């Protein structure tokens, strides 16, 4: 399986938009051949894809990005593997907790582990991350306790962790909005003279939002140290990426004056290298970068979704062959002295994680009723106080009744 | 709000299905009618309200759009200028705000700006309200934010029959209509008679007659008010229930007529009370019925707080007990 | 609303200048304070409210932004997350809507969403209101659209001294504040005493005491109400005038206290009456003062129509005669 | 004066953003050399500029765009000249009417006549135009009576013509919004199977608005027949273009999958040719195009603005040498047999136009008070009816007083 294999499916599907004949027309010129010299395997109009590890687990050389993973140790590779396995396990546990009624909803990251672990592990502690609602793997890398992610899906809160605890912002559901917050945060870093950087996650669907374009504009104009990390998982609920763009998304950046790169989003090493490269640019004061991680949403959009209504299963099957975890395992098994013990231990750790998640979720108490009125304002608000008091009196009236009725 | 003629065409259907049927009828009747939005095509919308429409009317008329609400409404305006009648879907209440500028600044004002030369028959469908245990942004009731804006009409059906007919009328209207669909009633069934003759779009309906107090509501709260009236009846209180159906314009005449009889009014909505519809209704009805009211107009609605996480929504939303409590308070005057 | 201590520091200045001075003071006092917006830098803003600030504090703190309001508010949120206190300018009222989503969905809700972990001390300055003969979108009064949204505070000064102090307090507030500046009063002068001790930001002020009726207003309409009171006094009517200063929260206690004395209330604002502040005030004050009111709370404000072209604004806006007419109507009860 | 001369000033000023070092970096690659083969005169990082008529009035050959003006007659050239002169005259008249208090405000197009007349004359009658608030020259080309443009600036209406009368939409003040309306209209044209096209005007400042990016996305995805015509007049009130972008604006299009071209906006022939090319692409079903007309706002932003606060006069002086009218006059005088009579007649026509504008404006009545309530809704609204009635009663009460007082 070659490089094309990861992108091949798209070429066919994109032909629908291609019927217009204008993409790659004379006037659109060199679009898509921006870094044509770097890779010969991607021919003609096929957009270039950075890939360091093939679906078969073969390491391919890449002059540009190899330096960013040059001194990675086997232990670190096993660490990435562990991250992906545990993230997937956590995700599966959450999905089944939803089925059991413990969660109201779950947005699975199945298939996107490499994009998230690769980019997440590229960040430094002082960097700041702005996720969408699906970055469970990035949260893991940032050290956010996975059970904290479940509160909002269980319906006990709208965001259950301190963003400043791990420099990992709350999940943002309204798509695209967080790219502006990330840009502003990065502007602040630059003002502070720090060399930290920011990663803003968003999806292929979100790329159409005006806010994302404005984030590109602001970050370019202020040269903000932000990496825009787009997980193109091919789908925005039921809409394929052709409904958002007729050229590869990474090319969007160029017209705003900063570079864009497409990386194999199922290649954890590639994602790590490209994100490191982009973060180092940011730290050096070279401004924003767009990384498009080309990956696939293996499962439903959320547990409320039924993908059989809009996509063929053979697509998913084809992508299974490019599984991010399987390919790193092949590599570990063939190129390192990782022994069975490692995998067995990890399996046990995985089981334990699943157990812990189940237990914590089931024990998660419902919030106190008065939480409705908490934190609406930092400095208080007379009306909130008034309504809280009325609510208390109203609640108390039932207590009275209960007492009267001898309950 | 229909004049039921006894035909066999009458069908029992869920509110969501009634809208689906209504859209289908409009698409059939007028080639200029379009349906646009995120996931409205192959998926048929996240609530299946547009189920099967793309299959039957094609991608040119039932259009999956890029994920950009301002773009959806902005291009719908352009399509309307070209003579189309777009019905756009905003996937959930909390996602209408990226389109807010296009709605209040362009959609609402272009008719006046053009001195009447331009008409924008655009319907913006918004599934709204809570009670379905959803995550943030999926349970809001922003109708006040549209009713305050001249140039828009704002309606919300409470049952399948109204949903069917009000959608027909909204699409036929030459004005932009913000069509709030009570998502937690999507699965509630009622008789829909496609041969009926519907009443006017902006007229309120007396759902249940009563003598002691009037409950006024629209959309998802109408059913609750009926339940309240049932419960109150058991205690010997006779409540009148109004389904307002339209938030802009509000049918003050019908409310006034009712209050002149019952002398007491409670307005119930899910939206926060502060600057909500209840405020406008209370202010105007108090002015109109100053000497009739035995008690101040009371309001039961959301608190001045962001819509809470699902496990708290029951406390946040008006429920049977909270409305009954307001009834007691009103009757105590 | 200040406790004037007799110092020589007191200066007579225009409202716009008072805000300028206030911003200057905040920039001096706290290196985290930023000023951002379109044309706020070299030009000093289209109303010169930020005049000279970039020259003195540099481009890093007084920032000319790209022309994208959602971007301005969205990046201000990010800057606030990083510990900054941005004061952003929206050039005119009608241009706030592209930023509406970021304001109501993010700015307003992030503190609650984070269970109090995150604070967003962002001030959004909006020159608002009519009366300056401007073209479309330059004369609107959208305060209701923000007051309905929990998580935001909404204020509007009516005079230079309040403008100075309320801006200080808004910047110091850990909550987002929508700061509506009455643009037609930008050039009105008053004494500003930078040594005074300001009263609370959200407290209303009795501008003028009276016994027959209360006029409640904020921002540009306070001056009008004072003129109305003058005119009424000549006819022997004693009107009390309240400057509400804050639209969210509303200081109902002060209004109630006044109405319990005067027994009559008229609310005056430029914004359309329908779903306007007057509705909320009328509803709540009627509830609080049901047995005190001799007349329904009346409202004088804009009509349910887009803000008209400049040559019609005098007819559209509340003016002396229209308020006096309402006074007569109220007293006739 | 060569091609560079028009763009030279920018290179220097843009260096501020250039300090970041990332524009044109290795990764950003070929940005700016998209059509490097077409023109050799623009060297290195200098963005390419289509120019058919130099500031000195010399006709330069351009293989790509010459065909679009190949059969233009001398009469037609004189027509373009006449359009520009009359538009400028009308504009000057409006400015002085504002000074005299007859208008509340005026947004002058001084300096942008070529961009507007060139693009405006490229349109066909069945095309549709969506202007900003400054397209007085385009309005002229579309046959809108110039006096109709003045109503909104006088404050008697918010838009004083029937958009469908000349397929010229109302002025849109909220920047960027109209690009979406244009895109939607173009989608409608495509649905109708017509071969008309749409031109959407916007400014360099407006390019930052999310709506413009969304218009690019929608038009690309639906392949809508729309030409985005950006007049980069270097300024957005007091902000130079560097506050909006760090690369030339025409390059924005590429990342959305359609071509962008920069044309000398003070060259009416260039603007005509490039717009015709773009419109023909649209008609052929090849989708959207972005045209950046590189021009200069010679005057203030509006009559309320004082540009001396933020820009040096020498900039304006430098641009005066590239005046769009002067260069066409040079050409007409040296390359055609246009005689003095033509210019003299035009001067007289110009005077007459000025007179007519003055007279019409001064005679423009204030609107009836009840106009407030007119056209709020097409189908009526109970509250508007109620308020109209109250207003009528209130007005009538004064009439009563007047009568009582014997007035
Ligand atoms: C502004 C807004 N509109 C609509 C939605 C509803 N919605 C939630 S996720 C989603 C699809 C997003 O797709 P993409 O950006 O590709 O991210 P993915 O879900 O594939 O990770 C939509 C339409 C939303 N959350 N926000
Ligand atoms: C959304 C919005 N924000 C702010 C303004 C105020 N404003 C009017 S024109 C203008 C500058 C626009 O610059 P540009 O797009 O370059 O057009 P130009 O005026 O130069 O023709 C601004 C900021 C507006 N009209 N709309
Ligand atoms: Mg996706
Ligand atoms: Mg400009």
Image: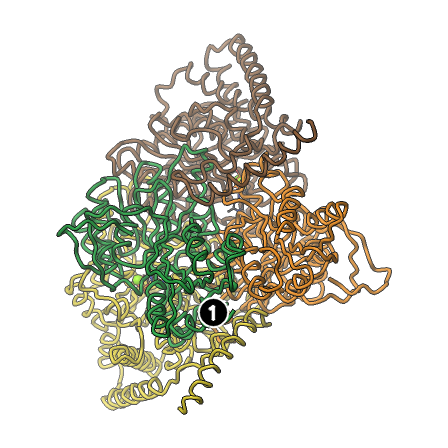
Chain colours: A brown, B orange, C green, D yellow
Q: Nearer the viewer, residue C213 or B184?
A: C213
Is residue C123 toward the left or the right of residue A49 in the image?
left
In this rendering, the answer to whether C21 lies above or below C137 is: above
Q: Nearer the viewer, residue A402 or C303?
A: A402
| B185 horizontally vs C254: left or right | right
Which secondary structure, mark 1? Answer: helix
Establish if D391 lies above or below A220.
Answer: below
- In which quadrant is the N terminus of chain B drawn? bottom right
In this view of the protein, which residue sits in the foreground, A288 or C302? C302
Q: Position of residue A121 (x, y in %)?
A: 41, 25
For mark 1, name the chain: C
User: Does residue D256 appear anywhere in the picture?
Assistant: no
Which corner quadrant of the image does residue A401 belong to?
A: top right
Residue plotted at (64% across, 62% down): B255
Measuring from the top left, give residue B184's x and y in whole percent: 66, 45
Image position, residue A225 (x, y; %): 31, 37
- Left or right of residue D375: residue D18: left
Q: Which residue is mark 1?
A: C331
């Amino acid at each position: 399986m070659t490089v094309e294999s990861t992108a091949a499916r798209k070429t066919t599907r994109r032909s629908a938009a291609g019927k217009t004949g204008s993409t790659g027309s004379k006037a659109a010129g060199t679009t898509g051949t921006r870094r044509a010299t770097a890779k010969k395997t991607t021919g003609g109009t096929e957009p270039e894809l950075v890939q360091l590890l093939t679906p078969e687990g073969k390491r391919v050389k890449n002059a540009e990005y190899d330096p960013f993973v040059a001194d990675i140790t086997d232990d670190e590779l096993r660490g990435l593997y562990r991250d992906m396995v545990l993230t997937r396990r956590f995700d599966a546990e959450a999905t089944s907790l939803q089925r059991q009624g413990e969660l109201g909803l779950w947005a699975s990251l199945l298939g996107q582990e490499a994009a998230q672990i690769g980019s997440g592990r590229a960040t430094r502690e002082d960097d700041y991350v702005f996720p969408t609602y699906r970055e469970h793997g990035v949260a893991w890398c940032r050290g956010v306790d996975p059970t904290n992610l479940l509160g909002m899906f269980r319906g006990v809160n709208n965001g259950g962790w301190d963003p400043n605890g791990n420099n990992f912002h709350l999940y943002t559901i309204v798509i695209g909005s967080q790219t502006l917050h990330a840009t502003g945060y990065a502007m602040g870093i630059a003002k502070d003279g720090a060399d930290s950087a920011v990663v803003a996650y968003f999806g292929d669907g979100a790329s159409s939002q005006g806010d994302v374009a404005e984030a590109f504009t602001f970050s370019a104009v202020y040269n903000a140290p932000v990496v825009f990390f787009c997980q193109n998982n091919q789908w925005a609920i039921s809409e394929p990426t052709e409904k958002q763009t007729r050229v590869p998304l990474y090319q969007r950046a160029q017209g705003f004056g900063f570079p864009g790169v497409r990386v194999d989003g199922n290649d954890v090493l590639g994602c790590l290298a490209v994100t490191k490269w982009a973060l180092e640019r940011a730290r050096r004061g070279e401004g924003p970068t767009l990384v498009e991680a080309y990956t696939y949403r293996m499962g439903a959009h959320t547990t409320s979704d039924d993908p059989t209504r809009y996509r063929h299963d053979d697509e998913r099957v084809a992508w299974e062959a490019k599984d991010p975890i399987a390919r790193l395992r092949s590599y570990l098994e063939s190129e390192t002295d990782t022994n069975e013990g490692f995998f067995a231990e990890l399996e046990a750790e995985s089981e334990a994680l699943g157990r812990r998640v189940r237990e914590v979720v089931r024990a998660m108490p419902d919030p106190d009723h008065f939480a409705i009125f908490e934190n609406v304002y930092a400095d208080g608000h007379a009306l909130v106080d008034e309504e809280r008091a009325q609510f208390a009196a109203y609640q108390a009236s039932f207590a009275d009744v209960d007492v009267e009725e001898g309950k | 709000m229909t004049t039921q003629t006894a035909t066999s065409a009458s069908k029992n259907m869920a509110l969501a299905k009634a809208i689906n049927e209504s859209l289908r009828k409009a698409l059939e009747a007028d080639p200029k009618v379009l349906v646009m939005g995120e996931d409205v095509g192959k998926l048929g919308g996240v609530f299946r309200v547009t189920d099967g429409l793309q299959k039957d009317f094609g991608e040119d008329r039932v259009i999956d759009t890029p994920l950009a609400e301002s773009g959806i409404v902005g291009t719908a305006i352009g399509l309307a200028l070209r003579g189309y009648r777009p019905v756009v879907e905003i996937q959930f209440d909390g996602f209408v705000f990226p389109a807010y500028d296009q709605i209040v600044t362009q959609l609402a004002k272009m008719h006046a700006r053009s001195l009447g030369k331009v008409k924008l028959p655009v319907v913006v469908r918004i599934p709204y309200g809570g009670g379905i245990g959803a995550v943030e942004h999926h349970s809001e009731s922003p109708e006040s934010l549209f009713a305050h804006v001249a140039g828009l009409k704002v309606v919300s059906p409470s049952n399948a029959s109204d949903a069917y007919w009000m959608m027909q009328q909204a699409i036929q209207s030459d004005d932009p209509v913000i069509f709030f669909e009570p998502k937690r009633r999507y699965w509630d069934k009622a008789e829909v008679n496609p041969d009926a003759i519907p009443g006017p779009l902006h007229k309120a309906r007396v759902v249940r007659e009563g003598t002691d107090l009037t409950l006024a509501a629209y959309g998802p709260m109408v059913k609750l008010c009926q339940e309240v009236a049932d419960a109150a009846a058991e205690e010997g209180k006779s409540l009148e229930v109004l389904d307002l159906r339209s938030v802009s314009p509000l049918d003050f005449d019908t409310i006034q007529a009712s209050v002149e009889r019952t002398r007491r009014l409670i307005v119930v909505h899910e939206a926060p009370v502060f600057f909500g519809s209840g405020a406008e209704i209370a202010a105007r009805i108090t002015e109109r019925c100053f000497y009739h009211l035995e008690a101040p107009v009371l309001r039961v609605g959301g608190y001045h707080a962001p819509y809470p996480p699902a496990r708290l929504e029951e406390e946040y939303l008006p429920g049977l007990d909270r409305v009954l409590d307001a009834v007691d308070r009103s009757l105590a005057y």
